[in-house]
Image (cartoon, helix red, strand yellow):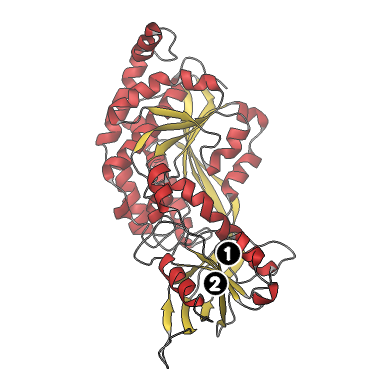
Amino acid sequence: MRDRIMARIMGNGTSAWTPEQLATMARLRDAAIADPYALDELRHLTNNIGPRLSGSPQAQAAVEYVAAEMKALGADVALEKTSVPHWVRGAETGELVSWPGQTPGTTQKVVLTALGPSVATPVEGLTAEVVVVNNWAGLKALDPAKVKGKILLFNKKFDKPLAAQEGGIYAYGDAVVYRAAGPLAAASAGAAAVLVRAVGGADYRIPHTGQTMYAPGVDKIPAAAVTAEDADTIADLASQGPVKLHMVLTPQTLPDAPSYNIIADWKGTEHPEQVVVVSGHLDSWDLGTGAIDDGAGVVVSMQAIHLMQKLGIHPKRTIRFIAWMSEEEGSQGAATYMKEHSAADFANHIGALESDLGAGHPDGVVWAGKPALGEWLQPVANALEPIGAQTFRSSPETGEDINGLTEKGVPSFAPSQDGRYYFNYHHTPADTFDKVNPRELAENAAVMTVVAYALADSKDPAPR
Ligand SMILES: [Zn+2]
């Protein structure tokens, strides 16, 4: 046992990396912590280019900008054409027009935001009584006659204590199903429109947008999220008597638009055909500027190639940067990548990384693959120990855009970020550049760079 522990610490002869390669990992780690490239790129993507909704001019500008930046680093850059939804947010307003205890002649503002790809209300808006349920069971228990023609509010609370203890992703998973399937359930029950309580832990009465779903054969009804505060107010008033809301949504769904994944290869010296993917998604929702979701994932992936160039490091295998398009509205870019590459290509995908859970401190890496992979990675974990990122855990999934690769048997990885606060900002107007802590962003860049290098330069490919 002691020998095994020592072997792990020392990275002995069974390690996939030589002492020189382990020293290179340390150099890359330290360079990532000191180098402002990722932060500077994020500043440009968020402040200068701004929100990058699929199909928007800003998304296209971001494609051109990032492609040029990767070319400037000396990578081989290709744009992979895909087709993406082109939904445009319009006006969105809401106000209570009647409720118990109302002061005559007044209305009360409700803060709401359309979910993508919601249909519009009539131009003059829609006015109806709001029926509140807490969950699916609440809807099932209702007499359908009570829902018909009304606005149905799914008031599913985001479990903040769970988010604080276990990480936001668990609380998000519990609540996001209402955002995703609420319009179908509401329309099936005959509702005229649907509201969902904002999914996330945000205070300060800010709404949380995101993708919802329609299905053939079910009426497409206007769908919006209301802030947690407004959901509480409406629920309280509705418990006292009838509450009527006037809402206006004027979004438009335009024809699908051409767009691109950016693929930038830092060519391997011995096995250029073997690739290790480092990636994030370039598109974002439009309320904020897409800093934590997912500008951060894109720039820490750019940083991996920048540091290779800066330090003159050329691993045996190719490091492939990918900026995925349209993750938010259905992962069309990732689907195109899976379609455009063959089984033989995937056999040459040695590993894939994606960062898409913000830029909080990473305590290590989550990986998906055979159990042997965990043992094999131990020297890499040791290399990340000085920045507190040495905890490697297995997980069935690592990232939305690389799940297809995981399913093909490609070992996949993601930094395991501190996600306790991520859902306070994610998909809200507050997802802006200032929410990214420069030191923590640099730690994520270090994780991406070191793991990508380790996979690209190991003696044999990672176990799969
Ligand atoms: Zn994302």
Residue lying farthest to the right in this orientation? 217
The C terminus - image quarter: top right
Q: Which numbered dot is residue 251?
A: 2
Q: Give neighbour class at mark 2: few <14, some 14-19, many 20+ (Cα, 10 Å).
A: many
Q: Which residue is drawn at 54% across and 43% down?
A: 401
Residue lying farthest to the bottom in this orientation? 105
As helix, strand or loop, the secondary structure at mark 1 comes to: loop
The answer to whether 174 appears left or right of 419 in the picture is right
Q: Does the residue labelled 2 lie within 8 Å of ligand 1?
A: no
Q: Which numbered dot is residue 398?
A: none
Point out residue 25 in the picture as x, y percentages from the top left corner. Answer: 34, 23
Q: Give neighbour class at mark 1: few <14, some 14-19, many 20+ (Cα, 10 Å).
A: many
Q: Residue at x 54, y 50 (%)?
A: 260
Point out residue 95 in the picture as x, y percentages from the top left corner. Answer: 46, 80
- Give the CA separation, mark 2 to mark 1: 8 Å
The amino acid marked with disc number 2 is: Pro
- Cβ atoms under marks 2 and 1 closer than 8 Å: yes
**434 or 173: which is nearer to us?**
173
The amino acid marked with disc number 1 is: Pro
**320 or 458: which is nearer to us?**
458
Which mark is first along the chain, 1 or 2? 1
The N terminus - image quarter: top left
Point out residue 195 in the picture as x, y percentages from the top left corner. Answer: 54, 69
As helix, strand or loop, the secondary structure at mark 2 comes to: loop
Q: Mark 1 points at which residue?
A: 117
**1 or 181: which is nearer to us?**
1
Point out residue 6 in the picture as x, y percentages from the top left corner. Answer: 35, 10
Q: Which residue is drawn at 37% across and 52% down?
A: 291
